[in-house]
Image (cartoon, rainbow, N blue to C red):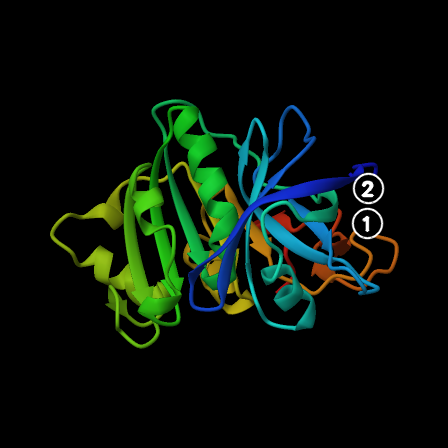
Amino acid sequence: MSAAPIENLTVEANEQIALDTWEMRLAGPRPASVQPGRFLNLHPEGFLLRRPISIADVSPNGYTVIYKTVGEGTRQLAELTAGAVVSAHGPLGHGFEIRSQAGQHAILYGGGVGVPPMYYLARRLVEAGVSVDVRLGFGTAGAAFYLDRFAELGSVNVATDDGTLGTHGTIAALDDALATGADGVADKPADAIYACGPNLMLQYVAQRWRDHSNVQLSFEERMACGVGACYGCVKPTMWGQARLCVEGPVLDASEVAW
């Protein structure tokens, strides 16, 4: 995976879409096929380290990435305007494997900045004939994004920590609400479970679906080199230390040593 090229990509658009959240469309060369869940390592000018940003969508012209402004590097990315050029290394990492077949059903969990890669995954699943049930968690209503776009692909349910949108509480509360709902959506058999978000959310998903054979989790972690050389983003697994920038960010839940 580390053999991915470093390309200069051109910013087509860079717009705020939610609280501290920006969507950037980048035009330029890309591989013929991009695995959902991989990321681009973008280089803000003047900074030593690149910033790993999830790929939210792929088009014939390039990529769409979504990121939160949490530090000086991402704040500089937010200042880029159409026509600007940004150095991008990638796509990097190991993403989600689509093992489902047409006619099957998948549940997708996304929490906060873990939501973006779930959109491209959902789109790829639907293109493969798989129905999707998307469950998203945000801090507050103002932080929510892409709800309409997910709704074009399948069912969408939302939880917010402060109760300003959807179910009041976490993804766990959302699951509980769906399980007791009249539509019975939580009772529909799932052939695949995918999740991306904070560690506590991923641990919950792994525990809830512990008897399921196809649960894939994408971990959020600070990264330095992005190519596995520095071992700064390791995750304990049943077989050793996984470098999330290379063996991850997506791991099978059965592999993770909690």
Residue 119, given in percent of the width and then of the height, sits at 45, 43
Q: Which mark is residue 2?
A: 2
Residue 75, given in percent of the width and then of the height, sits at 62, 68
In the rendered image, the vertical position of residue 19 relative to residue 243, given as above or below: below
Residue 38, given in percent of the width and then of the height, sits at 63, 43
Asked whether residue 65 is in view, the answer is yes
Residue 98 left/right relative to 188: right
Q: Quadrant of the C terminus?
A: bottom right
In the rendered image, the vertical position of residue 217 relative to residue 112, given as above or below: above
**Amino acid type shown at disc 1:** Val
What residue lies at 44% left-to-right and 45% top-to-bottom? 193
Asked whether residue 247 is in view, the answer is no
Asked if the residue under mark 1 is in contact with the one under mark 2, i.e. CB atoms within 8 Å, the reply is yes
In-front residue for pair 230/145: 145
Residue 108, given in percent of the width and then of the height, sits at 41, 47
Residue 178: quarter of image: bottom left
Residue found at the very far right of the displayed protein: 229
Q: Secondary structure at mark 1?
A: loop
Q: Secondary structure at mark 2?
A: loop
Residue found at the very far bottom of the displayed protein: 162
Residue 49 left/right relative to 189: right
Question: First in sequence: mark 2 or mark 1?
Answer: 2
Residue 11: quarter of image: top right
The crowd level at tag 2 (other Cα within 10 Å; few <14, some 14-19, many 20+) is some
The crowd level at tag 1 (other Cα within 10 Å; few <14, some 14-19, many 20+) is many
What residue lies at 75% left-to-right and 41% top-to-bottom? 8
What residue lies at 28% left-to-right and 54% top-to-bottom? 157
**Amino acid type shown at disc 2:** Ser
Q: Which mark is residue 227?
A: 1
Query: What is the distance, in whole Å, between disc 2 and disc 1 at their CAs?
Result: 5 Å
